[in-house]
Amino acid sequence: MRAMARIAAPGGEPVPLELEDRQSRTNRLPRKPPHVIAIYPGSFDPITNGHLDLIQRGSRMFDRLIVSILRNDTKEPLFSVEERTEMLDEVLHVYPNVEVDSFDGLLVDHAAAHSATVLLRGIRAISDYEYELQMALMNRRLSPRIETVFMMAHETYSFISSRLVKEVFSLGGNITGLVPPSVESRLHARLSTTKMKGA
Ligand code: PNS
């Protein structure tokens, strides 16, 4: 005879739960580590206030949060990995449990090398969902022990992307409030050197 438990479903009939099934499934899952390390991967070309909001909130959820810049990005970046690392360091040094690094190759291998059990990603709108779901499922297939955690972007920042910030800025639009002030200064410096080179 199987041991059965009955719990009340919210607002409905009690649902029978087979304890043995639940116990054996739970025993097969890895235990929660005492110290949860999360990776927040991305291009960060450049970091926006949307990224920053997610990092701030993530830093309160995990013991350590490693913001990891993808090195072998197929996109043509505006800032080098070294410049992006500097920009992230300038903004993030105030968070004691947040670190910045970069990686090549598979994200799950990078996470495993840091003993991270969580990949943190932000979702701004439904349009992000399909790509994010695909990546999360692929990463789960590659490494079932690593869980992707999604956080909804704050509504104030849900329309911001690095790509749009660069586009608006290069066309003379105002980007104040969309990126940290130090990043805005870097964009101004980059634009003036590009103009000088083109002159
Ligand atoms: O900010 P982005 O550009 O959307 O970030 C994309 C990123 C870096 C998370 C993604 O391209 C990535 O994880 N690349 C590493 C390569 C990898 O692991 N690919 C297979 C998993 S989908």
Image (cartoon, rainbow, N blue to C red):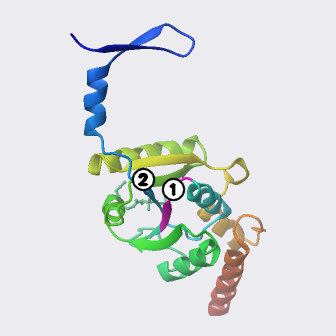
**Which residue occupies 37% across, 15% down?**
5
Q: What amino acid is labelled 1 in the image?
A: Phe
Q: Residue 48 occupies which quadrant of the picture?
A: bottom right
- 6 is within the stretch colored magenta: no
What segment carries the magenta color? 61-67
- At mark 2, the secondary structure is strand
Q: Quadrant of the N terminus?
A: top left
Q: Nearer the viewer, residue 120 or 65?
A: 65
The disc placed on residue 118 is 2
Q: Regarding ligand 1, which quadrant of the image does it lie in?
A: bottom left
3D distance between C-alphas at marks 1 and 2 = 9 Å
- Residue at 53% in and 9% down: 12
Mark 1 or 2, closer to the camera = 1
Residue 68, percent from left and from top: 46, 67
> Tag 1's secondary structure?
loop
The residue pinned by badge 1 equals: 62
Q: Residue at x 57, y 59 (%)?
A: 59
Labels 1 & 2 near each other (Cβ < 8 A): yes
Q: Is residue 104 visible from the viewing direction of this image?
A: yes
Q: Between disc 1 and disc 2, whose residue precedes?
A: 1
Residue 18 versus residue 69: which sits nearer the camera? 18
Q: Position of residue 197 (x, y in %)?
A: 62, 92
Q: Nearer the viewer, residue 78 or 93?
A: 93
How crowded pointer 1 is (Cα within 10 Å; few <14, some 14-19, many 20+) is rated as some
Q: How many marks?
A: 2
Q: Please give the name of the residue rendered at 63% of the width and 89% of the height, measured from the top-left corner.
A: 198
Q: Residue furthest left?
A: 1
